Structure formats: C-alpha cells, structure tokens
Amino acid sequence: MQTNKLYENTWEFNEGGVRFFLLAGAEKAALIDSGMSTKNAKQLAEEITNLPLILINTHADVDHIGSNAQFDSFYMNPSECSNYYHSGRCGAFLPARDGDVIDLGGRPLKVIETPGHTPGSIALLDVLNRRIFTGDPIQDGRIFMFGVQREMHAYISSLERLEKMASEFDLIYPSHGSCPVLPDMISKLKADAEKILRKEVSGTPGEVFGQKIVSYDMGDAVFLCDQ
C-alpha cells in the first residue's frame, strides 16, 4: 500500500492497480471508496486525520468496497444498491443523488451521476479545488463494459454531460490507470466509445472472470465489452 499526498488535505491510497482517496475539510473527512483487498481503510485514514470520518462509494464493484464493513453507513447512489446488497454486503446506505452536496466543512463535494460503467456510478466534484474524482469511467486503463448492468449508450451520455461540465474542473482523479488525467480525456473516451458502438472498430475476443468478452484497445483506454 502506498500513501501519497495529492494536494492540500487530500491523499491517495494506492494498492497497485486500484486507488481510493481521503479528503479532509474543517469539520469532517471523507474516504472516496474503501479499497479492494484492503480491509482497514478506516484505520489508514485515522492515521492521517482525527476528524470524524465518512465513506462515499463511487460504485459497488468489489475493488471499491473492500473496507466497507468497517462503516455502519456509507453514501451510495440508490441505483447501485442491487450491485452492493446482492453480493451479500451489509450496512446502511445514505442516498447520494445527482446534485447533492456533501459538505466536509468549507469543502463541498458535489455528487454527479455517471451511469454506464454501472447503473449507480457517481463522480465527486471537489468544487473549490476544481478537482473531480470519477471512479472507473474516466481512465486510461481497462474500462469494464461487459455484463447486464453495464451499458454503452448510458456511458456515452454520461461522458457528454461531463464534457459540458469540463469548465468546472482542472484535473481528474480516476481509480485506475494514470492519475491525475486532464479533462480532454473525456472527449477522447467518448469518441472511442461511439466508434465501438457503431461497430467501426474490431476487437479481440477473450475471457475475463469466466465471461467471454471482446477487448477494444483504442489507444486512450481498453474497453472490455460483451461479445
């Protein structure tokens, strides 16, 4: 586990392939996601800050909820609950809906719904610092788009919305791949996704977690899609 300070009152925990974040305000601190194999994210955060700690999940894929059991409650978009609770997880979710603001004390985090990668994916805009934490949809690594709950049309729509908001942030902090990345990554990924949807590019058949997929290496990122 590597811990890095990103900017003022903001830290990254990097497991080597997946990262989660700690943001501190004047009154409380927030973990954005809780790791993959990590089971002690709360203690890791408490080594850095003694502020009351909350948890916000960008989505419920297993590599983002590794330490959720340490928390009685967590913020999550309601559309993500089936992903979370059907895996046998427990804990009370606090709804994080589009446009909601979670204030850490002089540090507002704005919730932005970004469905597509999963139905309830959200991004968190660190409003005053002009940074955005996007989970999985914006990255230069592998973007999982296979399975019944992942949908390319919705993904493209979310990217279009983030494009329109690009004047509100200067840097993007993804959970995978390079970090940070610039806002122009959004338009690149949208163009790539549109080409895949229109069947203008050929992919390579493969298998991930026992599921047959097609991999599209678009240069900007690799999209793993249904066959």
Image (tube, grey):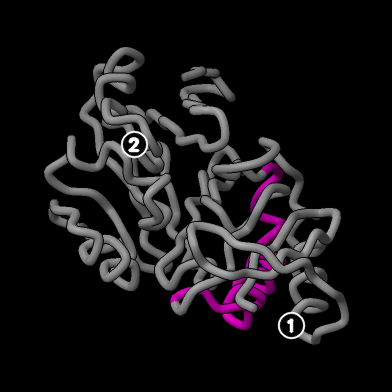
The residue lying at 43 percent from left, 48 percent from top is 109
**Residue hosting label 1:** 197
Q: Amino acid at mark 1?
A: Leu
Real-space Cα distance between discs 1 and 2? 36 Å
The residue lying at 72 percent from left, 68 percent from top is 205
Residue 30 circle label:
2
Q: Nearer the viewer, residue 221 or 78?
A: 221
Q: Amino acid at mark 2?
A: Ala
The residue lying at 50 percent from left, 71 percent from top is 115
Task: Check whether the beta carbons of the residues at disc 1 and disc 2 lie within 8 A of each other.
Answer: no
Looking at the image, the residue that sits furthest to the bottom is 198
Question: Number of labelled discs?
Answer: 2
Q: Which residues are magenta?
A: 149-171
Q: Position of residue 195 (x, y in %)?
A: 82, 78
Q: Is residue 91 left or right of residue 224?
A: left
Magenta stretch: dominant secondary structure: helix
The residue lying at 35 percent from left, 30 percent from top is 38
Classify residue 87 by image quadrant.
bottom left
The answer to whether residue 191 is magenta is no
Q: Is residue 179 left or right of residue 70?
A: right
The residue tagged with tag 1: helix, strand or loop? Answer: helix
Q: Position of residue 103 (x, y in %)?
A: 34, 45
Q: Position of residue 135 (x, y in %)?
A: 52, 50
Classify residue 16 by image quadrant.
top right
The residue tagged with tag 2: helix, strand or loop? Answer: strand
Q: Where 127 sits versus 158, above or below?
A: above
Task: Specify few, some or many for label 2: CA neighbours under 10 Å numbering under 14, 14-19, or 20 or more.
Answer: many
Q: Quadrant of the C terminus?
A: bottom right
